[in-house]
């Protein structure tokens, strides 16, 4: 189990920001260095800044190659245990649109079925 926790703050201007702290609440003395990977390749430009209460602020740039059709995931690992501390998932493109259209169509069918059953119930109880 990892000694660190990565807590997402926000995603803004193609940068994912988080706070890195220790599980036990103790201060992190040295600048943390976590492998940040997209498709098994290191994401460059990750930066750390000293924060409050011994925690560190982490900033991960979202690389242009992460923006593509489908689902892309960037993972942040503990360098020692190789445990996944956090992940950034990006969903976009036509493949996603098709999935959403199918889900919306199924929801419409269910709603129509419920409306028919409710109307039938109302007629039968009068």
Image (cartoon, helix red, strand yellow):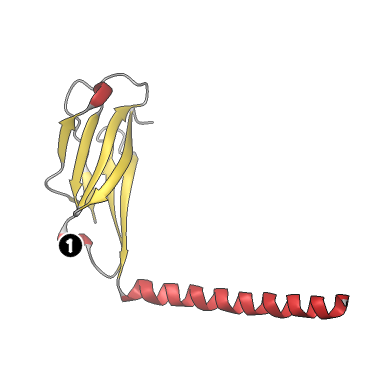
* Residue 110 vertical position relative to residue 64 in the rendered view, above or below: below
* Residue 48 vertical position relative to residue 53 in the rendered view, above or below: below
| Mark 1 burial class by Cα count in 10 Å: few <14, some 14-19, many 20+ | few
At horizontal 20% and vertical 20% (from top left) the residue drawn is 29
At horizontal 56% and vertical 77% (from top left) the residue drawn is 108
Mark 1 lies on residue: 65
- Nearest the viewer among 29 and 13 is 13
Name the element at disc 1. helix
Where does the image place residue 71, in percent across and percent down from the top left?
Answer: 32, 63
At horizontal 22% and vertical 60% (from top left) the residue drawn is 66
Where does the image place residue 101, in percent across and percent down from the top left?
Answer: 44, 77
Where does the image place residue 62, in percent across and percent down from the top left?
Answer: 19, 54
Which quadrant, please, contains the C terminus?
A: bottom right
On screen, residue 43 versus residue 110, left or right, reads: left
In the rendered image, which quarter is residue 93 located in? bottom left
In the rendered image, which quarter is residue 59 located in? top left
């Amino acid at each position: 189990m990892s000694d660190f926790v990565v807590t997402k703050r926000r995603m803004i201007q193609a940068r994912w920001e988080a706070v890195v702290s220790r599980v036990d609440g103790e201060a992190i003395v040295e600048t943390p260095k976590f492998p940040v990977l997209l498709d098994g390749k290191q994401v460059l430009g990750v930066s750390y800044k000293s924060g409050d209460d011994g925690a560190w602020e982490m900033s991960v740039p979202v690389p242009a190659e992460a923006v593509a059709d489908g689902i892309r995931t960037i993972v942040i690992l503990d360098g020692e245990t190789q445990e996944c501390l956090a992940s950034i998932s990006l969903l976009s493109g036509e493949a996603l649109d098709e999935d959403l259209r199918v889900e919306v169509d199924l929801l419409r069918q269910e709603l129509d079925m419920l409306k028919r059953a409710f109307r039938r119930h109302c007629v039968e109880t009068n």
